[in-house]
Amino acid sequence: MDRIILGYSQYLDHLENMINNMISYQLNMIMKTLTEISIVLTIPAIIFGFWGVNVDGPFEKSSYGVFAVLIISVILSLICWFLLRRKTYL
């Protein structure tokens, strides 16, 4: 009887370890995705931060300035995302 109980105990320990490993893997994947998003969104934040400073900047007096800065930030973010994907960082 002790041998059967010991066998079930070992089985449950292995099952618990497997479940913990699966949970850790899922948490790692979520954190990887959130890191990817934060890295890519940092670029537009920096560009809009520099453009929003109260000094003369490019495209400030033109009517299409907001769209130009938006397009530039989107293009740079996509380049960053593609480069990080290509180097398998993300």
Image: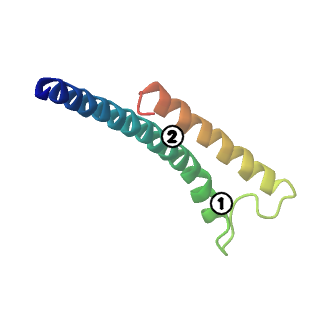
Looking at the rendered structure, the secondary structure element under dot 1 is helix
| Residue 59 screen position, x and y as percent | 76, 58
Q: Nearer the viewer, mark 2 or mark 1?
A: 2
Circle 1 residue: 48
Q: Which residue is mark 2?
A: 33
Q: Position of residue 10 (x, y in %)?
A: 19, 29
Residue 22: image x %, image y %? 38, 32
Q: Residues within 10 Å of mark 2 (few under 14, many from 20)?
A: few
| Residue under the point 67% across and 75% down | 54
In this view, the residue farthest toward the bottom is 54
Task: Name which residue type carries label 1.
Answer: Phe
Q: Quadrant of residue 61?
A: bottom right
Of 8 and 56, the residue lying toward us = 8
Residue visible at 55% across and 53% down in the picture: 42
Left or right side of 21 for 88: right
The quadrant in which the C terminus is found is top left
Among the two numbered marks 2 and 1 on one chain, the one whose residue lies closer to the N terminus? 2
* Residue 55: image location, x then y, percent: 66, 73
